[in-house]
Image: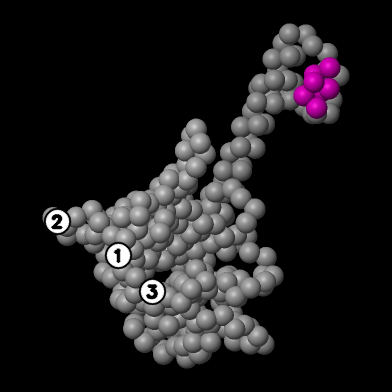
Amino acid sequence: MAKKLVRFDWAMKKMLRHKANFDILEGFLSELWEEEIKIKQILDSESNKETEDDKYNRVDILVENSKGELVIIEVQNSKEYDYFHRMLFGAAKAITEHIKEGQPYAEVKKVISITIAYFDLGQGKDYVYHGTTVFRGIHKNDILTLADKQIELYKKNSVHEIFSEFWVIKVGKFGNRVKDKLDEWIYFFKNAEIKASFSAKGLKEASERLDEMKLNEKDAKEYKRYLKGLRDIASEQHTKMADAQDLIKKGEENKEIEAVLGLHENNVPVPIIAKSLKISEKKVLQIIHSQQNK
């Protein structure tokens, strides 16, 4: 039986910011990008400071890798309709916070934004999405590329390597069927478990250091409060959804009543009203009698 680990978002908040645990994040990034990734440092940023509203809803971390790229890893627990805009804002803010006044544009750092979403972000059938910036000709359908001198100066091969890129991992869409090493990581995100057969980079270290049973008393209490906060959010969202459905149902019922009474006032026979509105004649009569008794 796989041992129970702390959730990845809580680990990001409390444990993965320490240099001794960089290898866990490095393992995840290496499997996501299919190349060896090293973290240079964790960066402090106005964009990743916790607010009271975000205490349970969102956890993020900003790191600089050995290539000098800024990597935002964010876990989002509840639905936000403007979340794509938030991703864009976060990337732009990271750029402006990490360039000094007077520096040339060539010093602008590339930002890679990774969202681990525990809600259904957008519409799509997949559970991992990758977005880059590509300039395509509207007449020739060719891809705009860097000139030889630009490649030499900036050590980049393609235009998209300069612009921010975005990854979205939709945890809820993952069906627990593990096909590769990235799936092993997503399984961990979804279930807070790592199976003994998993071999993805960083998971062995995660299994050893993120064991829920190894938390000290203070952290264990804090983790329980964190889980309770997540349950409260889920319960609140469920209540709001139920209330919204009730309002929709009530609105539909009011429209149905208005339609029945309108047709009845125009001397439309009960059978035709029922057939037109696809309801029973009994219900039509109940609505009419209810109105007459008011």
As measured in the structure, the alpha-carbon distance from the residue carrying label 3 to the one carrying label 1 is 11 Å
- Residue 283 - label: none
Outermost residue to the left: 102
Residue 281: give x, y in percent of width and height: 84, 25
Viewer-proximal residue, 124 or 77? Answer: 124
Task: Tell me if mark 3 has few (under 14), some (14-19) or many (20+) residues whose alpha carbon lies within 10 angstroms of its own.
Answer: some
- Residue 49 - label: 1
Q: Residue at x 65, y 37 (%)?
A: 249
Residue picked out by circle 2: 101
As measured in the structure, the alpha-carbon distance from the residue carrying label 3 to the one carrying label 2 is 31 Å
Identify the amino acid type marked 2.
Glu
> Element under label 2?
loop
Q: Earlier in the sequence, mark 3 or mark 1?
A: 3
Q: Is residue 248 left or right of residue 67?
A: right
Q: Residue at x 52, y 66 (%)?
A: 231
- Please identify the quarter of the rendering in which residue 156 is found: bottom left
Task: Tell me if mark 2 has few (under 14), some (14-19) or many (20+) residues whose alpha carbon lies within 10 angstroms of its own.
Answer: few
Q: Residue at x 36, y 69 (%)?
A: 61
Q: Earlier in the sequence, mark 2 or mark 1?
A: 1
Residue 145: give x, y in percent of width and height: 41, 49
Mark 3 vs mark 2, foreground winner is: 2
As measured in the structure, the alpha-carbon distance from the residue carrying label 2 to the one carrying label 1 is 23 Å
Q: Earlier in the sequence, mark 3 or mark 2?
A: 3
Outermost residue to the top: 266
Q: Is residue 99 left or right of residue 139?
A: left
- Residue 13 - label: 3
> Element under label 3?
helix
Identify the amino acid type marked 3.
Lys
**Magenta residues (range):** 272-278
Q: Is residue 33 left or right of residue 197?
A: left
Residue 88: give x, y in percent of width and height: 38, 51
